[in-house]
Amino acid sequence: MRGERAAPERQGYVRLAVVLGTCWAVTSLIYAITTEEPLLYSLAMLAMVSLAGAFWVVVLSRQGRRHRAQTADAQRLARERGWLFAARDDSVLDGLTGPPRVTEPYATRDLAVDVTRTLRLLPVDVPGTPERDGATAVELETVTYTYRYVAQRPGGIPLSADLQVVAVRLPADLPRTEVMPEAFGRSVLGARGRRGLELGVPEFDTRYVVDAEEPRVAWDLLTGGLARRLVDPDLLLGLPWVVEGGWILTWHDPRFLRSATIDHCLHLLDTVLAFVPPHVWQDARTEVGRV
């Protein structure tokens, strides 16, 4: 505990030193320019360069500490639940073309780190699946990972930003469907110049926005009772979720407690899968057979 309290204090002292040093360097630089003192000018410039370097050292060290803490958290989760852990596995990003993947021109790299995975038996009604204990269930891969994109503007130092992703592999590939909280979804659709799909369920339409590659499939996904289920208090989590290709996934801020937040995310994704009508999977497999 003593060490935990000391760390923020040290960071505060470093910030104060950087601020005071910057004020001194700027003041000295202005004075040197106005009085034409070359030695003072050189010292002021040297101080500003040093302070800029110190600032970036502080930023990068904080970033490194955050990454190490996230890795330790993922390893602890894997140990406690008996899941597999990989420090990095970019294959989970294959086929992911939209959110949460970042596509800005200055996002130079995107990685999947601190990957945990397991197989879970879920009550998903897939035609042709044998019953277990009187109910239809399928074993589906579940993956959690930190999606990290490294952004570097021209001439800048590369910095990373993270999103915690929770994903479940689907029994069949489906067209892309995004379900987003209303305020967030309106801004996304506005940027895309698109209109959302309205289901005619007022309590759902006022809380969520739907963007679908194939509106018919999105309609089948949501109108079998799922739209009304999503407005129940236990699922009003403020999280977007996306069906794309062979995955359904959601994401959140990694600063929150990993294990508790992952459970909330899995509850959301499992509920969606449980409401998917069997004919959706059957139609998807039929379409694949026609290709």
Image: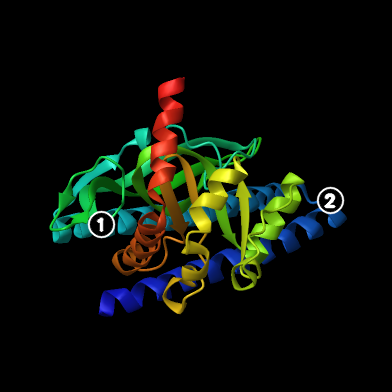
Neighbor class of circle 2 (other Cα within 10 Å; few <14, some 14-19, many 20+) is: few
Residue 68 vertical placement versus 283 (above, below): below
Tag of residue 72: 1
Tag of residue 36: 2
Neighbor class of circle 1 (other Cα within 10 Å; few <14, some 14-19, many 20+) is: few
Residue 281 vertical placement versus 290 (above, below): below
Locate the N terminus by quadrant: bottom left
**Between 252 and 31, the one nearer to me in the picture:** 252
Please identify, in this view, whether the residue under mark 1 or under mark 2 is nearer the observer. 1
Name the residue type under label 2.
Answer: Glu
Q: Residue 106 location, x and y as percent?
A: 62, 37
The answer to whether residue 99 shows anywhere in this view is no
The answer to whether residue 199 shows anywhere in this view is yes
Q: Residue 202 location, x and y as percent?
A: 65, 71
Q: Is residue 107 left or right of residue 115?
A: right
- Dot 2 falls on a residue whose secondary structure is loop
**Between 149 and 212, the one nearer to me in the picture:** 212
Residue at 36%, 43% in the rendered image = 170
